[in-house]
Image (tube, grey):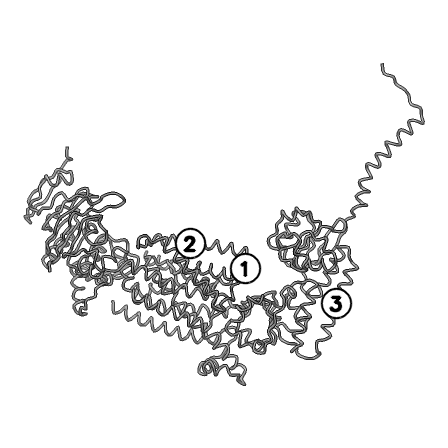
Amino acid sequence: MTHITKAPKGVFRRSLVLPLVLTLVLAIGPVLAAGCAKRPKTYTDGLGRTVTLEGTPKRIVSLSPALTEAVFSLGAGDRLVGVSTFCNRPEEALDIEKVGDAFTLNTEKLVALKPDLVLVAGSRDYETQVEKDLARLGIPAWVSGPSTVAEVLEDIKALSEVLGVKKKGDELVAALSQELDAVKAAIPEGQEKPKVFITFDSELWTSGGDSFIDDVITAAGGLNIAGDVKEQYLQLSMEDLLAKDPDIILVAIPEEMAEALTTRPGWSSLTAVKEGKVFFPNPDLISRPGPAVVEGIKEIASWLRGQ
Amino acid sequence: MSGGRVTVQDLVFRRGGREVLKGISFEVEPGRVAAVVGPNGAGKSTLLKVISGYLKPASGSVTVCGVDPASLHPSERSRLVTYSGDEPDPAFAFTVQETVEMGRVAAEAPVSRADLAGALEEALEALQLAGLRDRPITSLSSGERQRVYLARALYQDPLVILLDEPTTHLDMAYEVHVAGMTRDLARRGKTVLTVVHDLNLALRCADRLVFLRDGRLLYNVAPGDVTSEIVGDIYGVEVRVASHPVLGTPFVTPPSSRKA
Amino acid sequence: MATERAARNQRLVAAGLLFLLVGLALGLSLGSVSLPLRYVIRALAKGPSRAAVPSTDETEALAGAILWTLRFPRVLLAFIEGAGLAVAGSVMQGLFRNPMADPYVLGVSSGASLGAVLGIALGLGGVFGMWSLPALAFAGALGSAALVYALSTHRKRTDTWTLLLAGIAVSSLISSLIAFIMVIARERVDEIVFWTMGALSRASWMSVAASLAYTVPGLIALFRHARALNALSFGEEPAFHMGVQVEEAKRTLLWTSSLVVAGGVAFTGPIGFIGLIVPHAVRLVAGPDHRWLMPLSGLFGGNALLFADLVARVIAPPREMPVGVITALSGAPFFLYLLAHSRRRRE
């Protein structure tokens, strides 16, 4: 026989409160917790696309040597958990786990590192395979593709915001801008700019008017002899070179391989060669759209001024 | 000079582990025509190729004019002996005349232009090719090509000529013509060994008939001595040997029905 | 008719020489920088040392430099190499009794590519100065030819069928090796690809001298075997009976043409279609007699490469196309035309 005991009025009201509160907590709690711990933010990357991140990235993989250098310059190098095989500056980057490069990404390795942000070198004109892979994997990618020195500085600023080190970013960009202005100031007014030919291999491939290098040369106070061609890369013939006769030649090739270039028929007939105005810039300094490019520009400017 | 005497002694030839010629011995006098006859696979072509120096025997000896042709320098050998048989389809359009002229590609002895031209005309005429001399060889029928290769061998003019079934693509008229040609060659002092598939043709043009079966030489006789027993033994067919009504040479008629 | 043919072939020689003259004139005056013919003649007349003296006339000074250091050796190298390739092609076609054979049958071009690619990938480009890559390419070419030859020769007899198949197999193997190297040495891929497309841009007087040194004796040796080659084109057995020293002739012809081709490819990278098309086309007009075919192929092969290189230099300024691209683009359609034409003739 069951006993039905009627509860007293006060007890009923009291016994309702606890379950109600519990339900509320259970329902709202997670929402609140999520809100407190991770607030999604949107940023713009170097190509103007929006990147959504949940909080400040702590595990970063960089597939771009230029961006690796930028991260280190911003003091966030300790947050890099993976870099590309070409990332060789600064020295600390050599000790970081390698995940391949911009062309062949080892996706397994990448995923195993559990990154919350991947820095990629890309272009406005097309989407690289790496970007597609990252989208498929659902990993946020911050893409950069500066085509001028000014854009490099802008990208450093934007990157500093993403990394949560805006102040350091502003300082860095200000310092770099100052150095660039000094170079500009030292360029003599009214004089004709020295003609510059730059090459990266022994087959006379050079950078055209649309390239980053072209802007580097201009910033250093020179005139790229291939600058009138609106392309990124083009090949000149030795005849072209003889006809254009540059004042300064920059050979961005490791010195032991430069012999293949300097033994080409016609090379010794070039004015710049005869006058000893052939220099060997470090390709990592001038072709990488990163903070170190300012060093490269200063070096080129000093060679140009030595004229 | 012993003339073009061909001597074969205990010749053994192996191919792929099998003995194709099992100890063949015979001799052909200079200025004679010897016909090599026998059933398919008897080793007739192989015999000629060994004599020419192209194939090397496992044992035994071959001498032409007292010398082993295989031991000679190719240009010397080509003046001594040549072999003419079926050839693969020609790849390039040499003219008939150019093809025949190649018979003397290895010739070293200085011969006057006039003599060469004369010999060329003779060779072309012998095979009735004068009218075809500028035709590309790729445009000829197999019979015409066969005549061209024969003419080339004639132009080469060695002492011993080995002919391997020279009339397979030729019609009846040319068969007779070639038979006459071999007799002419013999009259001029050449030695001719010819593989003939038609026994009657052999009986008409040869001085000796060499019968092969299964790589063995079973009979070496003059045409007049060919009997139906010999033919039966070699071919396994019962025949009647009669005298040709016009030529007087023996000829063979196969039976009207199979041997029982 | 024989005399007709001889007369016609003599006319062909004259035509070939005329083309050569025109080719030289155009090749020396045209390029990324157009030089008027009078400057060309003046610079040529002055000679290399006097042309290098700076002149008040800027164009003349430029002409002197360009002509003597760049264009003249380049034009000569084009002719020499084109001649070598075409003659070697005619030899291969006769030996293999196939008008579709080309001079790279023994894997010479892939071997040369492998040698050069290894050199580029390992950064050996400067070890012996300008000679390192050609030396490596030459070694690769000969190595490949030796391998193919060894695979097909048994007891001093070389089987042509096996030669063809072994050549294909070795070439495929080498191609995959090259692909492998290209993946590993990604930074040098551009250089590697460029080399394998065939280019005359590095022509110098040294390379011209070297080319002459192996091409001239090579071609002489090959021409001396013209009659033997005629006989061989009927088959090895018929040639044997005609008195040709078959194995010796084959060996000499194969190796000499491979050497000539290897030497050429070592300097410029593989250039295709000249060795295949030119002898084939010349044979259609001049007949299959190698005593005419070989020298005429040489003459027209040299001209063909000369003109192809000219096109390569002017077709897409300021770029210089690799000449191998031009020979392929013009060679393949021409080849198809020849094919269709010969089929129609036969019908």
A175 left or right of B106? right
Front residue (pair C168, B143): C168
* Whether residue C62 is situated above or below residue A200 in the rendered picture: below
- The residue under label 3 is A177
- Judged from the image, the secondary structure of the residue bearing numbered disc 1 is helix
**Amino acid type assigned to the residue bearing label 1 in the image:** Val
Q: Quadrant of residue A307?
A: bottom right
Identity of the residue drawn at 66% across and 78% down: A192
Disc 2: which residue: C170
Q: Could you say where residue A37 lies in the image, as x and y percent from the top left?
A: 79, 45
State the residue in front, C45 or A262.
A262
Q: Nearer the viewer, residue B121 or B1?
A: B1
Instruction: Please state the chain letter of the residue tagged with numbered disc 2 in the rendered image.
Output: C
> Where residue B203 sits in the image (x, y, percent)?
10, 48
Return the x and y of residue C18 as percentages of the image width and height.
Answer: 38, 74
How many neighbours does mark 2 have within 10 angstroms: few (below 14), some (14-19), or many (20 or more)? many
Q: Left of C182 or right of it: where is A143?
A: right
Q: Quick one: SS at disc 3? A: helix
Q: Position of residue B184 (x, y in %)?
A: 11, 57
Quadrant of the image containing the C terminus of chain B: top left
Q: Which amino acid type is marked by label 3?
A: Ser
In the displayed orientation, state which residue is furthest to the bottom.
Answer: C56
- Total residue callouts: 3
Q: Nearer the viewer, residue B260 or A71?
A: A71
Q: State the separation of the CA atoms marked 2 and 1.
A: 22 Å
- For this orientation, the residue located farthest to the top is A1
Q: Tell me the distance, in whole angstroms, between the alpha carbons under discs 3 and 2.
A: 59 Å
Q: Earlier in the sequence, mark 2 or mark 1?
A: 2
Please state if C249 lies on the left or on the right of B223 as rendered.
right
Q: Is residue B220 above or below residue A214?
A: above
* Residue designated by label 1: C189
Q: From the image, which quarter does the N terminus of chain B lie in?
A: bottom left
